[in-house]
Image: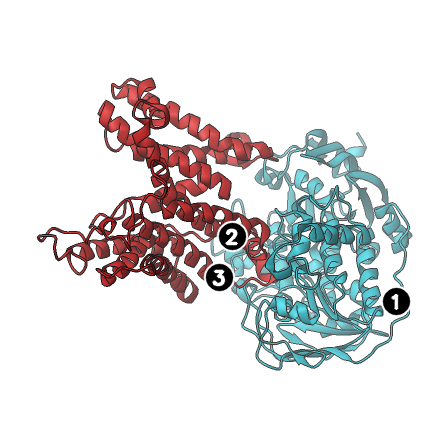
Chain colours: A red, B cyan
Amino acid sequence: MLRLEPRPAAPAWLELATPVMAVIATMIAGGVLFALMGFDPVAAVRTIFWDPLFGPAASYSRPQLLVKAGPLILIACGLAVGFRAGIWNIGAEGQYIVGGLCGAAVALAAYPAEGAWIFPAMVLAGAAGGWAWGMIPAMLRNWFGASEILVSLMLVYVAQRLAAWMAFGPMRNPEGFGMPGSRNLQQYPSAANPELVAGTGAHWGVVAAALAVVATWFLMSRHIRGFHIRAAGLAPRAARFAGVSPAALVAFCLGLSGALAGMAGLFEVAGPGGQIIDSFGSGYGFTAIIVAFLGRLHPLGILLAGLLLALTYIGGELAQLTLQLPAATVQVFQGMLLFFLLAFDTLTRFRIRSARAMA
Amino acid sequence: MRVTTTELFRAEGLGKTYPGVRANDDVSFSVRPGEIHALLGENGAGKSTLVKMIYGLVRPDAGRMRLGGAAHAPADPRAARAAGVGMVFQHFSLFDALSVAENVALGMDAPPPRRQLPPRIAEVSAAYGLPLDPARRIAGLSAGERQRVEIVRCLLGEPRLLIMDEPTSVLTPQEAEILFATLRKLAARGTAVLYISHKLDEIRTHCDRATILRQGRVVGTVSPGEHTARALAAMMVGAEMRPVDRSGRQAGDAVLVVRGLTSAPGHAGTALRDVGFAVRAGEILGIGGVAGNGQEELIAALSGETAGRPGTVLLSGADLSALGPEPRRRAGLLAAPEDRLGHAAVPEMSLTDNALLTGATRQRLAPRGVIDHAAARAFARRIIAAFDVRTPGPGTPAASLSGGNLQKFVIGREILQDPRALVVNQPTWGVDAGAAAAIRQALLDLARRGAAVVVISQDLDELLELSDRFAALNAGRLSAPVPTEGLTIERIGLMLGGAHGMEVAHVAA
């Protein structure tokens, strides 16, 4: 039998070093995996981590970095606030989908009218949709003590069914010759979320993500509410003594992370995605959980981690094209990253002892 | 050797080091058969580490022990029990839903058959004057009765050396008397008792010898009856104790008024029932009682962690009943809960952040929600300086402070906010004598400046020393407050419900 024993004191620099160690370990383990599958490990790792930025086709793939990192960072900022408070929203994917649906609904209802009010209204509707989807687990937890982890996760599947129904039903493009999927919002100027500066990939969602990083930093390190959130995560009774209402905190954290995820969904459906289709959810909501933890729940860390995870998305697609690596590569990489991060975290805080030596 | 016939247990040069702390350093002492031997020392002096080594919970990293002439180096508590060492812990490990007999059986290494156990429990409890019904469920027992279950469980193992860790801290004075009668009988039959406490008076009356520890080292072994409590305290602390100064206070108008306060049970499980009292400016009200009788619920209801019905909590006539902790602080009602780590303070956060935790409103540390870190640091520094908190600086995490220093910090944090009324729960629990005296003096000084102070405590000496009036909290009910002057420990014991189980005890004894 092995058991974990807390180390007396873990040095502070390890806190920053473990994400880097996790990335390196992922590259090594990924390389070994590719070698076993018969691919050249060095070429595969280079294709995923290097070529999207500096390879021969980098001018095509580089803008994709911001396109993918934007929603990841936007969602992860909201999640990190809740995780700091010990409130575990695992269902950002569902809030992302519902936000996209609500934002698209505003655009589709307004079509074909043009006006400067349409896009801002869509952003508000997207945020409201995500917020409302996040309030379901919040209310169930506050009223009945239901676990927000399970409820938020299960609501992802409800949201996916909802998206499929919308794509085949109420939101189907009447001029789409019976094909599933809504109108393409990119072809509807008042509702479109275009690339703002050509060649960068930056759309309004990327701007929102940048604002979210700054706002989250301000909230968590400068504002009394962020201080209360951190206190609640570390010592719930002390936070309560300081005057934090646990129920209000649950509603705030799930509402905030839901609203940010909903906005990310809206920016996606009005921009790179373009339309509501049945497979609208693309896993950003789940990957953002990895981003939040890899970034140590700190806004700056989340910024870097978001870019890195975006890189694995693009690099994975590139490796599929050029090396014929299987499509699941990205997920394997992302999964390994989280696994190694948690493993290194555990090993810096605890050491392994055999139970016999303990007695 | 002759020595082995007059000594049951001997420790020679025992040492144990934890990261950053030398918990025991070259500790040597011996215990004779049939004696009640006290281990005396402040919190953190190394008493617990020492007995844990004897009971096999901790392995010494220097020195050796002998028990009854043989080397004693238990690998675990089971080995220690087999060698004849029994231990009764301060915190009980009993299953509420099971009966006394079942609990006893669960704690034994080789329990006898089911049918034989109840008669044996009855036999032991009769022999030692420990009234106990084997068939009763633990849930319905008082703290004193629960302790008897633990003692009986130990005695069934027929120990030669019985270790008791602060046994009277959960007992009323009357229950404590029953316990001492039992210990006398045990000693008369040759069992040695190693008795940990920091209550000087009970050690002076009941113990044959006392070994005094200070900062992990043995200061000396003395006959406690031959020394005054003051002299013993001086040996423990290494300095003379200064009596507190109660002078210069004048009672004014009623500041804090509590009426008909009734609450749902908290996680400790005791609901408040119709609690009422009034505290005047400059006055200290002491609330005594054994823990678990509603103390947690009372402080939560006063701090605002639980809201009450309208008209139950009034400060200078203003009804605060429905308000949460922050608005109550703004109004001037402050509180310091018992549990320092995790309730009064966030262990992982720095002292600066912990100063911000309750000081934000009254000290204006976060104007319009934006934290003024420099002001928070200055406030933390002010607390550290005014209350002599020993720490490298305000950036130190709360958890790395010793219990006494952190307690000075959390009490100081509330006092420096100039409250109109302050409620503290167990202000000197687990705090060394020097820091305890400083905290008590600070509470008296606060009252002198015109604040109303409520001290909730299990330490009756502390309450007698501090308070002008005394009330007892028992099973969620508060007795009518009486003036402290002229109050005897016996009278207080009766107010605390010390009569519980008394009649049975007299019959058995």
Q: Name which residue lies at 56% across and 62% down.
A: A244
Q: Which residue is mark 2?
A: B105
Q: Name which residue lies at 45% across and 41% down.
A: A293
Q: Quadrant of the C terminus of chain A?
A: top right
Q: Name which residue lies at 32% across and 58% down.
A: A122
Q: Is residue B353 above or below residue B270?
A: above
Determine the chain carrying the residue at label 3: B
Query: Which label's residue is closer to the chain start, 1 or 3?
Result: 3
Q: What separation in Å lies between label 2 and label 1 (alpha carbons)?
A: 52 Å
Helix, strand or loop at label 1? It is loop
Residue B216 x %, y %: 77, 39
Q: Is residue B262 above or below residue A15?
A: below
Nearer to us: label 1 or label 3: 1
Say few, some or many: other residues with alpha carbon within 10 Å of mark 3 (under 14 / 14 to 19 / 20 or more).
Answer: few
Q: Is residue A88 above or below residue B6?
A: below
Tag on residue B97?
3
Query: Which label's residue is closer to the chain start, 2 or 1?
Result: 2
